[in-house]
Amino acid sequence: MSFTAHKNHGPKGVAALFLRNPRTHQAFIYGGQQEWELRGGTHNVIGIAGFEAAVEDRFRELPTVIGYLQDLRDHFESSILDIVPKALIQGADSKRIPNTSCITFPGIDGIAYMAALDAAGVQCSQTSACRSRKPEPSPALLAMGLAEDEAYASIRFSVSTLNTPDEITKAIGITSSVYRQHLEKERTIA
């Protein structure tokens, strides 16, 4: 299991890796005896201290943080469903992380819609950051049973403890406005 500091507003470039049995893995960076000879190199002590501080802050406030993020996410999702009744919230009936929403907008070219949202100031994605340069649909969405066209029409939104309710309201307005413009554009082309 891997953990990155920046996901908890800690410093970028610092992560932790939990291996149930480190002896079963081979080194991917050679050069030293550190980390059971799995990764050579000097430890980023300042980054590690920042990572620790971020994790301590997060765990101290975890129930409050989870509630806040869920409230933001749920408000965003319910508002989008009011505006775009055909939209589908992926995983809505499942236990899921409180800060992320994946919404399928049927009949929409997701790549163009995402680009238009980004240009309008709403940061979103179609896949995880590690897959963002790959043009194929999200393997996670396909594994959930979505067809390719549904996966391509799905946009992932995330909220943070740094977001405010006013920002979510603004994002809802932009998302719905860009959706209507995008839908009209696709109807004109068809």
Image (cartoon, grey):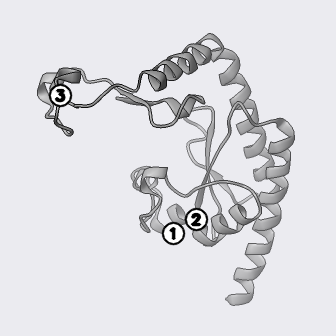
C-alpha distance separating marks 3 and 2: 47 Å
Relative depth, front residue between 182 and 12: 12
Q: Is residue 176 left or right of residue 147?
A: right
Which amino acid, mark 1? Asp
Label 1 sits on residue: 149
Label 2 sits on residue: 153
For the residues carrying marks 3 and 1, which lies nearer the camera in this image?
A: 3
Q: Is residue 40 left or right of residue 165?
A: left
Q: Is residue 46 left or right of residue 9?
A: left
C-alpha distance separating marks 2 and 1: 6 Å
Which amino acid, mark 2? Ala
Percent position of residue 46, x then y: 48, 23
Q: Secondary structure at mark 3?
A: loop
Which residue occupies 56% across, 16% down?
53
Query: How packed is label 1: few (under 14 Cα within 10 Å), some, or many (20 or more)?
Result: some
The answer to whether mark 3 and mark 2 are in CB contact below 8 A is no
Which quarter of the figure has residue 6?
A: top right
Label 3 sits on residue: 32
